[in-house]
Amino acid sequence: MFVMATWGLNIVSIKYLTQHMDIQALAAIRIVIAFATVTLIIKARGGRIPKLGAAQLGWVALAGFLVVYAHQVALVSGLRFSSAANGTLIMATSPLLSALLAAIFYREKLTLVRISGALLGLLGVGMVVAGGGAQLGLTGWGDAVVFVAVLVFVFGGLVIQRMSRMMDPLGMLWYMYLAGGLMLVAHAALTPAAYESGAWQMPWWPWAVLLFSAVIASGVSNIVWNAGIARLGISRAALFVNWLPIFGLLFAALFLDEHVTPTHVAGLACVLGGTWLGLRRGPQARQAAVKA
């Protein structure tokens, strides 16, 4: 839940920062700072960066490309054309996509209860977005690109789940940020707007917001998220993504003076119910837990 709260606040932070920096430069510097944060956390815990074989390097490079580079670029590009309501609702399809893909690739049991939980949570998210008075409609180029951002993030989660069997979450995240960060820096270096002087001349408050976005939302929170995937699996961990638009709207109300309506409360109840259903253990799993 901490991860979803920080990611929800991060959406508001990024919207604020786009008014002060070039988008590609912003994405690159956030990941560079997050990479430095993960490095410091590893050193503070007395750990070391593990040496990887060729196969492991290939997996972390793929995860870095999907979760760090492709997700960031697609999300930012899509939201330029898609409405915030559409983007939020599309992002909330992550739990259902995760459950379906995990069932296909990792043969996780796709129960009716788990699907019902994902759909109920999606219904709650739709109610929240509609309660904000926004116009819904999953059409247009921007919507399609945002959906691509969700899809690459979910596929990246599957890669992380596979990698978690053979790597420590911290070391895994370090290599992911290294690979994805290099890609984002190269992308920003090829973007002319990143060289404009105005892209870097900001007062102290935007820099403070940037540090929160990079250190807490992109550094610490992603460590917790990867650990959650390793423990729960991507299909169950991704159900918490339903909370992302809830927290996003709450922080928007707090910082942008938007109103929370009864429809938002009803949507929150659906998200709670969907998360409970999705994380609920079946009879066989409960019996196994009791025997253990």
Image: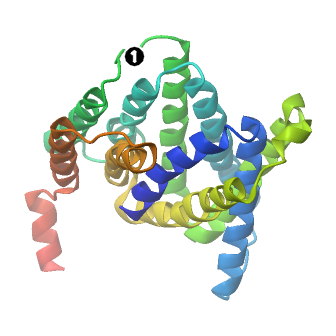
Rendered position, 163 above or below 170? above
Relative horizontal placement of residue 173, taking residue 165 as reference (left or right): right
Q: Give the tally of numbered discs.
A: 1
On the question of residue 164 being in view, the answer is no
Rendered position, 222 above or below 194? below
Q: How is the image coloured?
A: rainbow
Query: Which corner quadrant of the image does residue 209 belong to?
Result: bottom right
SS under mark 1: loop
Foreground residue among 3 and 84: 84
**Identity of the residue drawn at 91% across and 40% down:** 197
Foreground residue among 88 and 47: 88
What amino acid does circle 1 point to?
Leu
Residue 229 position in % (x across, y down): 43, 59
Instruction: Give the residue furthest to the top.
Output: 140
The image quadrant where one finds the C terminus is bottom left
Instruction: Give the residue furthest to the bottom.
Output: 46
The image quadrant where one finds the N terminus is bottom left
Pointer 1 local density, CA inside 10 Å: few below 14, some 14–19, many at least 20: some
Residue 213 position in % (x across, y down): 61, 56
On the question of residue 286 being in view, the answer is yes
Residue 258 position in % (x across, y down): 36, 39
Residue 140 position in % (x across, y down): 49, 11
**Identity of the residue drawn at 55% across and 36% down:** 152
Would you name the residue on which mark 1 appears? 138
Rendered position, 37 above or below 204? below
Rendered position, 212 above or below 105? below
**Identity of the residue drawn at 57% across and 64% down:** 216
Foreground residue among 239 and 207: 207
